[in-house]
Amino acid sequence: MKTTTTIITTERPTEPTPTTVSSTDGVIGIIHPTESILYPTTTLILSNGSSIERPVPYIRAVVEYSALEFCDHKINFRSMLSQWITQHLQEEIAVSPNEIVFFNMPDCISMNLKEPNNDFVTSELVQPTNVFFYVTKQGKIDPSLTEKFPINPRELELPQELNYLREKVTQLELIPVEENYWSEADLYLPLEEAAIGTSIIVIIVIVSLVGVTIILGLVFFMIVKRRSSSNDYYGRRCTPVSMDAYSMDSVSVYQSFRRKSKRNKSSRSVKSYLNQAFDDPNGPTRPLNFAKLTHFISDIDGVHEEFLTIPVNMPKYDEMPAGVEDKNRYANVIPVPETRVTLKAIKDSNINAEYINANYVRGPRNESKYYIATQAPLDETVQDFWRMVWEQESRVIVMITDFVEKGIDKCADYLPPSETLDCHRLYGDFQVTLKSRDMRENYVASSVQLKNLENNLVREIAHMWYTGWPAAGVPNEEGAFIYFILEIRRTRKKLRAKGPIVVHCSPGTGRTGTFLANDLCMRQFEEQRTVDIPRTVYAIRRDRAGAVQTKEQYAFIYRTVNLFASKLTTGNLDSLP
């Protein structure tokens, strides 16, 4: 079995046929498609001679160069793209320039002006030029990394020698795979499994046919038997049957609750009994008591594999309101439409004034709007951030990022300077005043006075900033993070807060989702002495797409909850730092 890279194009009949060229490495490219749907695909040549083509997403870059000019800057352009994606991933994965593949640009050696029949040169002397590329890892196309490429890299820095290229890129666009091509599971099928897959399918079909035949025979037999005993059957009275007569393995708890709720509308909601996302019977689940939890976290590969099984549920770009792109810190981090926080309309303002990149997230016992997961404010959205805090009556803000990390801006400075107390700043109709700041070993607790100048009302806001999270990776001290979470609970209770807890990192997904999962799972174990981490993360992702970004963050949740369970079981919570 071998792999080759090709391009497939789906066109409308009225569209012109694109020009096709080949480069020296055998990659086929299609030059300047108009409205055609263009996809690079990996072609799998199976042992039986058949092939499977799998389309993958890619990035379209519009550059202010002709094709000839682009050739002069091709190496630097690769370096710029690799630096952008590496910074965007916070250096968790390093992408080298050689792993950026341009698949519609022929080899520059063939672009010689002395060749009069070179159609590519003739057609490409007009600016701008479309450059199509994807990201690879270990010599294979990596759809996941390609989709994570920053479409709006304005906040990312470049070495001085590459800055001149930034202005030449006028547009970056992710071209996703159409849903009717392949399912996500099929797209990410490992190459080694492709050949096996066809054999398995044949076996499954044969077994299914045999199974259907047996079932039909049994149904026919039962119908005949029921008819022969119908008189006796209808003469009987219904008698209760003990649950001991059934195997518990065959009983669906979820279906039992559903049937009961249909019979008795006044019965208590199922959601009050079950933890997050248990209304989805197909969601991932692994309920563990303390002993099983301790055993499972010793298998780090198993934890990482479990993380990969949790659906991501990313919203589509066309589900965002028009014209709000500048209000998103990252182009590929957008709020789920169903749970998006909407700001109140402002008189004489455009519709975009109602938009903020934030989502409500369900809390303990499935309580709606318990948290708000949001991106770190941009300079131009700080006023929107404080409007949201006021309108939602939030009294606690949790911050899990620094303002600048590794020289990259991560969060606008939305608080007054810490050097002087009672110093205030104005953000639109809101005055923010720093009343106190308590510097701890791993976090900073501040008291902020938020004043609405329009109605002259004042509220006290607690700002809890966790400073123990490193710029890359996860904290080494699970105990300090547990103490931070418990301190937030105490603070919220002290303020008698009823509004959502506002939580943000930089994108409002990775560290934010990790905080939410830890808080929810700790509460689960407190109440039930069991915890279901994959189901909890799945539930959070349904409210805030992309929550818990890395397998390291996922493993950190397991370690933190296990330590909390250990302390709670032994009655030793006071020993936390």
Image: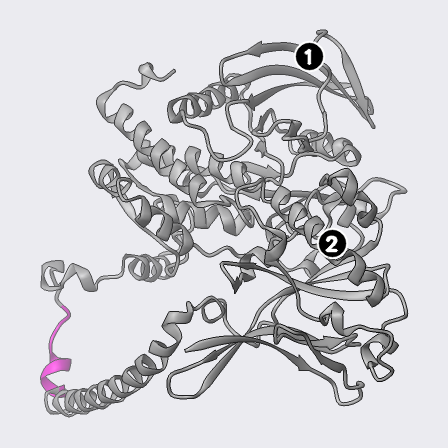
Task: Indicate the amino acid at tag 1.
Answer: Ser
Q: Taking the image as drawn, is residue 91 in sight? A: yes
Q: Secondary structure at mark 2?
A: helix
Task: Indicate the amino acid at tag 2.
Answer: Phe
For the point 49% across and 35% down, which residue is it?
Answer: 473
- Above or below, 479 against 103 in this view is above
- Above or below, 100 against 299 in this view is below
Label at residue 383: none
Quadrant, the N terminus: bottom left
Label at residue 418: 1
Q: Magenta stretch: residue 514 in it?
A: no
Q: Marks 1 and 2, how far apart in space?
A: 42 Å
Q: Of 418 and 265, which appears nearest the observer?
A: 418
The magenta span reads 230-238
Whole-percent x and y of residue 18? 76, 82
Q: Is residue 562 left or right of residue 165?
A: left
Whole-percent x and y of residue 103? 67, 69
Q: Secondary structure at mark 1?
A: loop
Callout 1 touching callout 2 (CB < 8 Å): no
Q: Which residue corresponds to mark 2?
A: 77
User: Would you identify the image quadrant in which residue 34 lies?
Assistant: bottom right
For the point 77% across and 31% down, which residue is it?
Answer: 383
Q: Magenta stretch: residue 231 in it?
A: yes
Q: What colour scheme does the image use?
A: one colour
- Above or below, 414 against 208 in this view is above
Quadrant, the C terminus: top left
Q: Is residue 27 left or right of residue 550?
A: right
Q: Residues within 10 Å of mark 1 (few under 14, many from 20)?
A: few
Q: Principal SS element in the magenta part?
A: helix
Tell me the mark number nearer the camera, choosing from 1 and 2.
2
Q: Taking the image as drawn, is residue 331 in sight? A: no
